[in-house]
Amino acid sequence: MSLPIPTTTITVKRRAHDPTADAYDPDTAGPTLVASGVPAHFSSLVAVEVTDGSSQRYTATLLADPVDLDHADVVVDELSGWEWEVTSARVVTDTERRVLDDTAHVTAGVVHHAGVG
């Protein structure tokens, strides 16, 4: 069963992880596609902050149909084109599902970084 009222669909991309690489090594492999066309809903923005005077960080909560989400995955809102980084993700338990009419889903914290001007 799908979310009762999805407002968009998402694509999930996973960054390649090389345990021998350090933070300064270039990402040569690029992301792999995990899923696309997944019904979802982004909450109203939880926070908007100016990070260094020239960019902003938007924080929101994502609610989606069951999908494999990991920390640091990239979620693309297919409606707006915005890319969001997953900061946390979890499958909603059976007890919590009843709130949404027995709909299994995933909830995740996400952030979007954008330049100003």
Image (spheres, grey):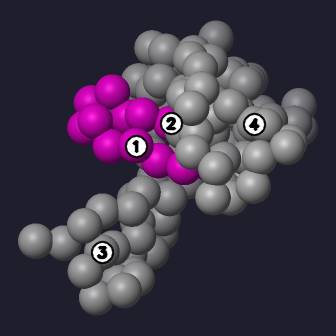
Who comes first in sequence, dot 1 or dot 2? 2
- The residue at the point 33 percent across, 73 percent down is 56
Discs 4, 2 touching: Cβ within 8 Å: no
Residue extent of the magenta highlight:
75-86
Who comes first in sequence, dot 3 or dot 1? 3
- Disc 3 element: strand
What whole-number distance in Å separates the C-alpha atoms at marks 4 and 3? 27 Å
- Disc 2 element: strand
Confirm whether residue 103 shows in the render: no
Confirm whether residue 71 shows in the render: yes
User: Is 83 included in the stretch rendered in magenta?
Assistant: yes
- Type of amino acid at the residue the image marks with label 3: Ser
Check the image and report above or below for 29 versus 48.
above
Discs 3, 1 touching: Cβ within 8 Å: no
- Disc 1 element: strand
- Type of amino acid at the residue the image marks with label 2: Val
Mark 2, residue position: 75
Q: Which mark is residue 55?
A: 3
What whole-number distance in Å separates the C-alpha atoms at marks 1 and 2? 6 Å
Q: Which mark is residue 83?
A: 1
Who comes first in sequence, dot 2 or dot 3? 3
- Type of amino acid at the residue the image marks with label 4: His
Q: Is residue 73 left or right of residue 81?
A: right
Q: Nearer the viewer, residue 1 or 21?
A: 21
Discs 1, 2 touching: Cβ within 8 Å: yes
- Type of amino acid at the residue the image marks with label 1: Glu
What whole-number distance in Å separates the C-alpha atoms at marks 4 and 1? 19 Å
